[in-house]
Amino acid sequence: MLDKNTYKLITKNKKAYFDYEILDSWEAWIELKWYEVKSVRNWYINLKWSYIVAIWEELFLKWANISAWKALPKNSSIETDRIRKLFLKKKTIIYLLWKIKEKWFSIIPLEVYFKWNLIKIKVALAKGKKAYQKKQVLKERAMDKQAKIMMKKYI
């Protein structure tokens, strides 16, 4: 029997982990049309430049590219970058709206995954990193990689 917390990752927003310091995250439902569900099930989704906006105390996902499903007719007009509504608890939404009014805070999508049979999205409250912090991360990665190479030579 599957555990309640098991999930199958569809896509991950790697750029978000590099550009932002993740403070807290929540699981949200995403409103999709039938052909978008088919596309997500076939892994045709990209979160690279996507972000979340608040309009009238509701959260919406913008610039998440869900490509057209291959079996759709070629003359059908599909919006790949349309705005999609996210569903969270009202208390959480109010907290997020209050936090993003402060300077440097953003709400960003991190992952899209299957939980049981449902498509869910991991939403995070994040604070933008400065350029020098990003350079430091790159330096540390390079140093770790160099150390691993040196360890392989001597072992």
Image: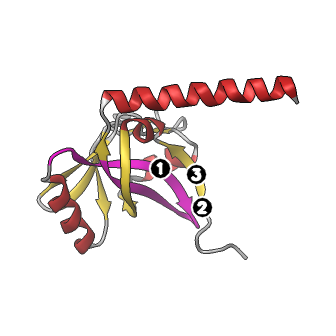
Q: Position of residue 74 (x, y in %)?
A: 45, 29
Report the quarter where the N terminus lies.
bottom right
- The residue to which callout 1 is attached is 111
Q: CA distance from mark 2 to mark 1?
A: 11 Å
**Rendered image quadrant of residue 128:** top left
Callouts 2 and 3 close, C-beta under 8 Å: yes
* Label at residue 52: none
- The residue to which callout 3 is attached is 9
Earlier sequence position, callout 3 versus callout 1: 3
**Rendered image quadrant of residue 148:** top right
Q: State which region is magenta.
A: 103-126
Is residue 75 in sight in this rendering?
no
Element type at mark 1: strand
Q: CA distance from mark 2 to mark 3?
A: 6 Å
Residue 98: in magenta span: no
How many neighbours does mark 3 have within 10 angstroms: few (below 14), some (14-19), or many (20 or more)? some
Q: CA distance from mark 3 to mark 1?
A: 7 Å
- The residue to which callout 2 is attached is 7
Amino acid type at circle 1 is Glu
Amino acid type at circle 3 is Leu
